[in-house]
């Protein structure tokens, strides 16, 4: 009996070890005998899937019976995407997944996605930005070798768009690094901009930008309900932070003038972070 018990414990330990240090290979297919949905099962495994679901109405799976797809609406600063559990990065790891647009969109309606990695302190780093041909529904394979980030991170693929109803469909998500068990963070702060892995608290502050479009300086009017410190950040359309200023917010109306004269023409986002929450507004920079 002692020998059998010892052997059973060794087998159990082997199984647990294999589960804790397995590579990430997710095809978004149901597991035989599993009662919960694929999406619920992924969330239980520490995935975050803001505005994503399996086989939403109107989509066709890329491979097999099921694929993951985004919601129907699109805007340039949305947090829609998929965030993996924590992964073990060596000096070089490979990320790969298939994707397409479920319905072709007009050439004027952009589609793109951003790839971030986030550490245990929730700090995110943008490592890739991919412009997608939304006029085609043919599946494409994305592949990237991630080097120079040894340690423990999670991957965030953030899908964005500008108009039209064409969902991203994703399948066959593979990463060569092992899945590791770590406490699950509440959010990922990607390049200084909270990307909304979990719902952020409702903000009591209101912000207004003027003029818009802007040439040299943008005025940021912030209305708050108490005295507090905060930060004003400006990010470009790819999510990269280009300006950050610490500010003191007084109860009531506040106005700050931010010099953007050196920024290239294009779309930008002003984000005000304080104890009362996070608020974001878009402006257009012109020469």
Image (cartoon, rainbow, N blue to C red):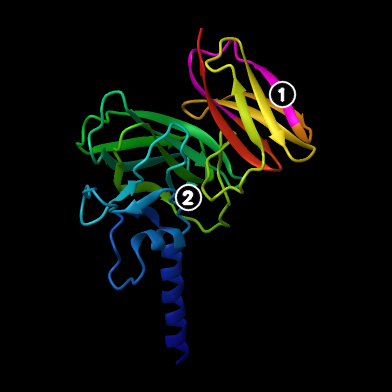
Q: Is residue 132 above or below residue 187?
A: above
- Name the dominant secondary structure of the magenta segment: strand
Task: Give whichever of 187, 283 is nearer the camera.
Answer: 283
Q: Position of residue 98 (x, y in %)?
A: 28, 42
Q: Which residue lies furthest to the bottom in this view?
A: 1
Q: Do the residues labelled 2 and 1 touch (CB within 8 Å)?
A: no
Q: Residue at x 53, y 44 (%)?
A: 196
Q: Quadrant of the N terminus?
A: bottom left
* Position of residue 253 in the picture relative to residue 270 (left or right): right
| Rendering coords of residue 208 (x, y %) | 61, 27
Q: How crowded is mark 1: few (under 14 residues within 10 Å), some or many (20 or more)?
A: some
Q: Position of residue 122 (x, y in %)?
A: 59, 44
**How busy is the neighbourhood of tag 2: few (under 14 within 10 Å), some, or many (20 plus)?**
many
* Residue bounds of the magenta highlight: 253-270
The furthest residue to the front: 252
Alpha carbons under labels 2 and 1: distance apart: 43 Å
Q: Which residue is painted at 30% across and 45% down in the image?
A: 170
Q: Which of marks 2 and 1 is in front?
A: 1
So how many labels did they put on this image?
A: 2
Whether 267 is drawn above or below 39: the answer is: above
Dot label at residue 97: none
Residue for badge 1 = 255
Q: Dot 2: what SS?
A: strand
Query: Dot 2 corresponds to which residue?
Result: 87
Magenta residue check for 103: no
Left or right, 217 with reference to 11: right
Q: Which of marks 2 and 1 is nearer the N terminus?
A: 2
Q: Quadrant of residue 121?
A: top right
Residue plotted at (48% across, 49% down):
88
Picture residue at 37% right of the left edge, 59% below the top: 39
Q: Quadrant of residue 278?
A: top right
Mark 1 residue element: strand
């Amino acid at each position: 009996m002692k020998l059998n018990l010892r052997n059973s414990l060794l087998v159990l330990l082997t199984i647990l070890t294999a589960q804790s240090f397995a590579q990430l290979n997710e095809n978004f297919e149901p597991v035989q005998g599993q009662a919960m949905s694929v999406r619920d099962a992924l969330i239980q495994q520490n995935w975050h899937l803001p505005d994503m679901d399996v086989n939403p109405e109107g989509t066709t799976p890329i491979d097999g019976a099921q694929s993951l797809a985004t919601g129907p609406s699109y805007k340039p600063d949305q947090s829609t995407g998929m965030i993996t559990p924590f992964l073990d990065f060596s000096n070089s790891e490979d990320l790969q997944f298939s994707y397409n647009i479920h319905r072709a969109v007009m050439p004027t309606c952009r589609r793109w996605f951003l790839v971030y990695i986030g550490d245990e302190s929730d700090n995110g780093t943008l490592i890739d930005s991919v412009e997608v041909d939304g006029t085609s529904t043919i599946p494409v394979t994305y592949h990237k070798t991630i080097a120079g980030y040894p340690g423990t991170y999670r991957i965030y693929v953030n899908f964005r768009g500008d108009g039209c109803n064409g969902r991203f469909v994703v399948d066959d998500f593979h990463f060569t690094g092992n899945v590791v068990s770590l406490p699950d963070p509440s959010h990922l702060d990607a390049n200084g901009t909270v990307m909304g892995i979990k719902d952020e608290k409702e903000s009591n502050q209101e912000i207004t930008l003027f003029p818009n479009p802007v040439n040299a300086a943008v005025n940021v009017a912030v209305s708050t309900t108490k005295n507090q410190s905060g930060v004003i950040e400006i990010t470009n359309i790819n999510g990269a932070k280009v300006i950050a200023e610490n500010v003191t917010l007084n109860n009531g109306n506040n106005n700050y003038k931010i010099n953007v004269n050196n920024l290239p023409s294009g779309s930008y986002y002003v984000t005000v972070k304080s104890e009362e929450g996070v608020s974001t507004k878009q402006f257009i920079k012109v020469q």
